[in-house]
Amino acid sequence: MNLARSTALLLLATWASAQDVEPTSARAIRSLVTELVSELPYRVPNGEALAIEAAPGSDTKVVEAFTAALLAAGFRVQVGAAAGAAVPLKVSTRKAGLGTIRVEAGDFVTERMFSHAYWVDHPSAQSIVALGAPKATIEEALQSAHEKVRAELRSRFPGLAGNADFERYVTKPSATSFIARHTVAGRPVFEAYVLAEPQLQHLERAERLAVRSVRRAPWVRSGMLAGAAAFLYLLYVRADFRTRGWRTRRLRILFGTLFVALSVGLWSLPL
């Protein structure tokens, strides 16, 4: 089962709650810290000084990353039981299914869920990761992300614009995606991350060939036109000779018309 399908199944089990869902623990931590910066100083006394208490069984690495993010945001942090005026901030994590980071300080409680879609932050050199615009539905969010991937591919390979095979390739939906869920003003908002892994080397080769063909096309058409003109002229001379010059004017009109028609046809041929 690919990541998109498994993530969707996991999210279906959690959407009944009001928790936000992020693709990675690092993004969940950043979201939590942003909320703490804006809310905690006004919700609890002395909310700038915190004493981190990790709940039993919590992931040590996640707690350490969360503590470092708090320090970077300007909080005064100590680890262990609260001392002096520091506010006890209990941090608990869970690994089952979607990961969870939960923080509690007095009556202030908030948490984030996250998956392990590390490709969101660490894409390979041969892949494209796009974040769609926030939307009210999952379908709209995915469509927005897919449109960004298509726009990226078209901007990278302008020489393939209009190519039917390229357009079919571009419009093919990506198989790997992650749906982030955010709660804004009490309403769910969805953002889709999409991973595209196009054959960039093949596309680059195809674009080089397409550009070369475009540059060569006028010369090829000119050569074909010159050959057609020479052939028609020889036919005209032969016909004029056989008619002893009695039909010269009509022959000129006839072969002139043929040359114009042949020129239009040859110039419009796809190469």
Image (cartoon, rainbow, N blue to C red):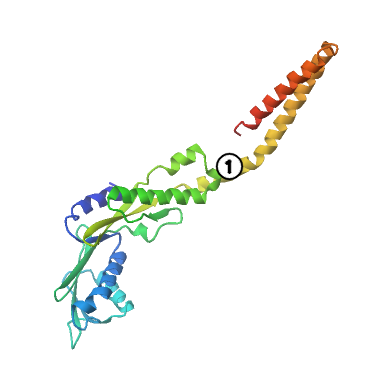
* Residue at 50% from the left image edge and 51% from the top image edge: 155
Q: In this view, does 210 lie to the left or right of 198?
A: right
Residue reaching furthest right? 244
Q: With respect to residue 216, does 44 lie above or below?
A: below
Q: Residues within 10 Å of mark 1 (few under 14, many from 20)?
A: some
Looking at the image, which is closer to me, 124 or 41? 41
* Residue at 32% from the left image edge and 51% from the top image edge: 141
Looking at the image, which is closer to me, 87 or 80? 87
* Residue at 80% from the left image edge and 17% from the top image edge: 249
Q: Is residue 183 left or right of residue 211?
A: left
Residue 111: % across, % down: 21, 66
Residue 175: % across, % down: 35, 46
Tally the numbered discs.
Answer: 1
Query: Is residue 101 in sight in this rendering?
Result: no
Q: In which quarter of the image is residue 243?
A: top right
Residue 143: % across, % down: 35, 48
Residue reaching furthest bottom? 84
Q: With respect to residue 244, does 270 lie above or below?
A: below
Q: In which quarter of the image is residue 228?
A: top right
Residue reaching furthest left? 107
Residue 214: % across, % down: 62, 41
Q: With respect to residue 189, does 37 lie above or below?
A: below
Residue that badge 1 annotates = 210
Q: Is mark 1 on a helix, strand or loop?
A: helix
Q: What residue type is labelled 1?
A: Ala
